[in-house]
Image (tube, grey):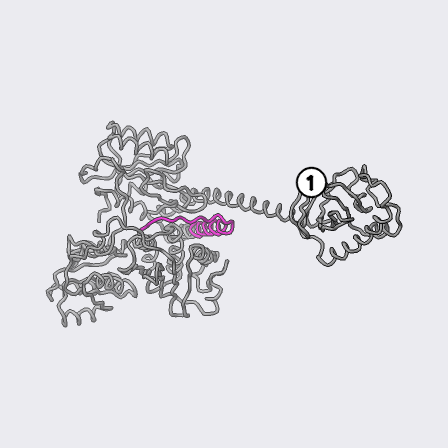
Amino acid sequence: MNTAMVSPGLPAWSALLFCAVAAAALLVWLRLARSRDRREIPDARARRLPDEPSCRAILDALPDPVVIRDLRGVIVAANGAYARLTTGQPGPHGLAAAPERLMEASHGGRWLSWSETEMTIEGRPHRLLSGRDVTDSVRQRRGLEEDRTRALSESEAKSRLLATVSHEFRTPLNGILGMTRLLLETPLDLEQRTYAQAVQSSAEAFLRLVEDVLHLSCIEAGRLELSDEPFDLGALVQGIVELLAPRAQGKGTDIAAFVARDVPALVQGDPDRLRQVLFNLAGNAVKFTRTGGIGVRVDRGAGDLIRIMVEDTGPGISPERAVEIFDEFETGDWAPPGEPGAGLGLAITRRLVTRMGGTVTLASELGRGACFTVELPLPAAADPNPAERDEAAAGPRGPVLILSGSPFSGRYLARTLDQAGIAAEVAGSLGEALDRMAARRFAALLADHALPDDDVRVAAREAHRHGIGRTVVLLSPFERRDFGSPHAAGFDAYLIKPVRPCSLFEQIEPGARAAAPAPARRGPVAGAPRPLPLSRRAPRVLLAEDNEINALLAVTTLERLGAVVDWAADGQQAWDRAEAALRGDALPFDLVLLDMRMPGLDGPEVARRIRAWELQGGGSGRRSRVVALTAGEPGREGARPVPPGVDALLLKPFTVEALQSELDRLDPPVAYADAS
């Protein structure tokens, strides 16, 4: 069977010249052979021109096959090249009549490109076809296609391998990091503490490298898929800042966020990819900034553009390095000793932003910090609770004095208050704050404990002396442990940094509503019974984790936070204990932590069964919070989406702060040991 496909043919000028020569030779031969019986040539060996030396010599001298057919397809003439090529093989039947149309037909493993021309012989239309051997070019093209297919297959295999390896790496890394953290909380001498900290920093560097290589591989393999869903941009930014805050505060710097009021409460886009971009940028800022602070600011641009700026007071970047900073494996010369990184984070960031239809730019000078600006098209999404989000704050309308030496926190708090209609002023030192109190009456004082402790306590005392009705101290979680009672220090309340807008308004005037949107919270499943009020007691946690080291880490951490933990070594055990609680044979669980991958029943299946029981009215009539533990990040290669019935995903290796946050989200809250 002949196979045909479009392919390059003979050049037009050579085809015309050849046709002219061939036509002239054939006309001479036809005149000489008019009296002969022109019956159809019975086989390929007979398909030769009559023994006219001149005509045969002309056609047979041509290296390419030539054949003439009438409209019925009968061969009336052919040269020697055609006869040698097609011996025992059918000719190129069914060729189109369009002049210069190029076709290919396979002959004995060879490929020919045919050029066709119409001609008239003795008043009858015929078709003159000449062929050219293009076997080498066809095989080359097919080879390239096979190479491309093989490369794609290898790339997919590499992506699957990296996804699996990444998951397997995370599991032991979770144990190394967690156990090292617990070890550092025990009494150690200076030498032992130095060794343990070296293990911790090395494991963290290894984890970052695994993540960067996995992400870059997925992008290069073309397996990056973007979601398009509504999400709370303010909550996303605040969550990133809160996640990075312990790292920043641990090295004596500060991090804060501000979202302008004209930014839509809900936007449409890919929250997981945006979270990855901002985490890379803000994480780099935290790593390189040794003094001062980091600010993440969100404004609205033209049309649907959202502008996100990540600023820092770090060492800055020279113009020469700024040009290449987004290239792969480019690391900063200013990086802290021992942790320059692999130089993939910013390269991944640029590719992700470009894939989402946006841009990322850098403005920096040596010694003056850096500012990365991301602009993305994030259209506003329909807001199900617009009235609740637009409600103005009910706090004091009088001015608020903010005492803060941070380059971003104080300024961002003032802007948050200003856009809610509350005047605010920032004082960078105790002396400046005392001058402002003497010159003007304020309704509230916010004092940042990042300033010297004595200055903060003096500010509180002077605030009461000047008739300021509300005083609030801003503390990091580390400072909160040592600060003692805010009332003993002269304050009415405290706020944990970074400060959420809703918490800010609540503490300025207890009972006030925040003008800014609070982070979205997943509500109960439709049809589920409403939770019953709980007494103040330690939260009960069901932990399903098949890795013994990770289980020991989680149990130890949760118990230190005051929780009562029931550990299940696999999915079936987890379901048996959850079912007993749902039947009323055991106390209910406030929080259920499920590993996504377990032998027997996996985490999603256990979550599905729990929700099915709750929908049927089983258990105590309250809804447990279900969190899935995963080693693959949401929206990334190797990761599962959030399963039905699961409230949130907790990424391994998880931290004390992450577990603490899950306990804080229990609704209604329950008391635990570290209630201070």
Residue 323 horizontal side relative to residue 59, left or right: left
**Residue 658 screen position, x and y as percent:** 32, 47
Q: Magenta stretch containing residue 228, yes or no?
A: yes
Q: Nearer the viewer, residue 212 or 273?
A: 273
* Number of numbered discs visible in the structure rendering: 1
Q: Magenta stretch containing residue 237, yes or no?
A: no
Q: Nearer the viewer, residue 448 or 503?
A: 503
Name which residue lies at 18% across and 57% down.
393
Q: Which residues are magenta?
A: 202-231
**Residue 420 screen position, x and y as percent:** 21, 60
Residue 606 horizontal side relative to residue 224, left or right: left
**Residue 105 screen position, x and y as percent:** 70, 44
Residue 302 horizontal side relative to residue 132, left or right: left
Residue assigned mark 1: 2
- Label 1 element class: loop
Can you tell which quarter of the image residue 562 is in? top left
